[in-house]
Amino acid sequence: MEENNNLEMGLFGMDSDLELNLDASPEDIAGLAGEDTPPAPAAETEDTTPGETPGEHIEQFTEEGATPPEDVGEEEDPEGGGDDNTSPNLYSSFASELHNSGVLPTLDLDKLKIKDVDGLTTVIKGEIDAQAKQYIISKVGEEGFDALEKGVSLAQYQQHTDTVASLDAITDDSLAEDLDLAKRVILQDYVNQGLTEVSAKRVLQKAIDLGDEVVLADAKESIASLRVYEHNRIEQEKVLAQTRKQEALQHQEKIDNDLKNAIYSKQSYIDGMPVNKNIQDKVYKAITEVVGESPNGVMENQLMRDRRENPIEFDSKLYYLYEITDGFKDFSKITTKATSKVATDFERALRQTKFDDAGTPSFTVDKDSYDGLGTELVL
């Protein structure tokens, strides 16, 4: 026993190279040993353990392979945003980078503050519209953009520009050198004023009878009149196009309102099959939601796309339903067939059920599958 005691003491003796760093104070150690508590030592000038040289504790963490203690406290986010990366500065900074790279050249962050993703989306859409406008203006000019925006077709405006260019190319010298051209100018001017071609030719003939100088003088007046007429014509076309566009918008708005009323005012689209608000919303969305564009440039909802991608199967099923429902007027055949099938399947299941001698279905006898609650079928 003594050898063992000596061995145990030798493991923790002073001769060992193993050094213990205890956090307990000398007062605590003395208390555990049952000794009187020694007086507290004088305060050290540095934060060191008695018997330890200054800086020795720090050197223990600077040895090879050692890791200094880490501060487990949470680091402060210098931006003050924490894990939330949706601060207004993020969107403004991103927009500023797009502006500097030339993607948003017209953006003015001093006047427009971007605080969220909706603001950034609005800015990008506005830039797309602005660049599209500038592109059109570069091709057709301010007057052309105004005409196209009001509803004049590109073909109509191109015809207008061609006519203006032709009229501008006609000078007094070209009229003097080409009397046939002068006569055509006069004739067109008379027609534009409302005369029939026969009446216009009769008036023109009177000018021809008076001599070439009269024809040339009338042609100079007619060319100026034709330029004014063409300017007024395109302006009138703008007004008509804008009126047609407004009427189309009003007509579409009426269709949308009628569609909403037809969908949301009915409690049932098919007799015997009531619908709720959720179904009404889905039906309206299926009709009005655009999912893409066809190869011909027509906007499509999902039903239109499905039909375009598989027209034979789609139309076959559609016309089948149309025929058996008498033009979508009588769905009784479909509901009758569905009800009949359910009843037939139920009857078949009953016929396949085995009964014991007491006439009770076998599944009610099996305690593991039937707990006896409820009322058994009486056949």
Image: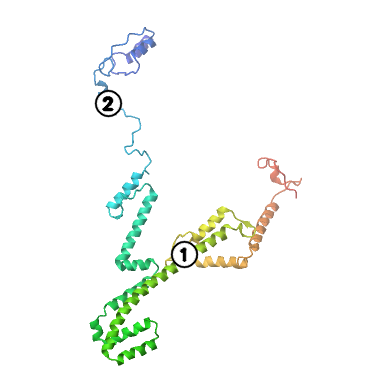
Q: Indicate the quadrant where residue 60 lies.
A: top left
Q: x%, y% of residue 118?
A: 39, 50
Residue depth check, mark 1 versus mark 2: number of the one nearer the observer? 1
Kind of residue sitting beneath label 1: Leu
Q: Disc number at residue 249?
A: 1
**Quadrant of the image containing the N terminus:** top left
Image height check: is 247 above or below 52? below
Image height check: is 355 above or below 167? above
Q: x%, y% of residue 65?
A: 27, 29
Q: Indicate the quadrant where residue 171 lies.
A: bottom left
**Cα separation between marks 1 and 2:** 79 Å
Furthest-top residue in view? 36
Furthest-bottom residue in view? 209
Q: Residues within 10 Å of mark 1 (few under 14, many from 20)?
A: few
Q: Nearer the viewer, residue 344 or 135?
A: 135
User: Is tag 1's residue or tag 2's residue first in the polypeptide sequence?
Assistant: 2
Kind of residue sitting beneath label 2: Phe
Q: Which residue is drawn at 39% across and 72% down?
A: 237
Q: Name the residue under label 2.
A: 61
At mark 1, the secondary structure is: helix
Q: Residue at x 25, y 86 (%)?
A: 178
Q: Nearer the viewer, residue 215 or 79?
A: 215
Q: Nearer the viewer, residue 322 or 147?
A: 147
Colour scheme used in the picture?
rainbow
Q: In this view, does 90 lie to the left or right of 260?
A: left
Image height check: is 249 above or below 10? below
At mark 2, the secondary structure is: loop
Q: Which residue is drawn at 65% across and 62% down?
A: 332
The image shows a total of numbered marks equal to: 2
Q: x%, y% of residue 117?
A: 38, 49
Q: How crowded is mark 2: few (under 14 residues within 10 Å), some or many (20 or more)?
A: few
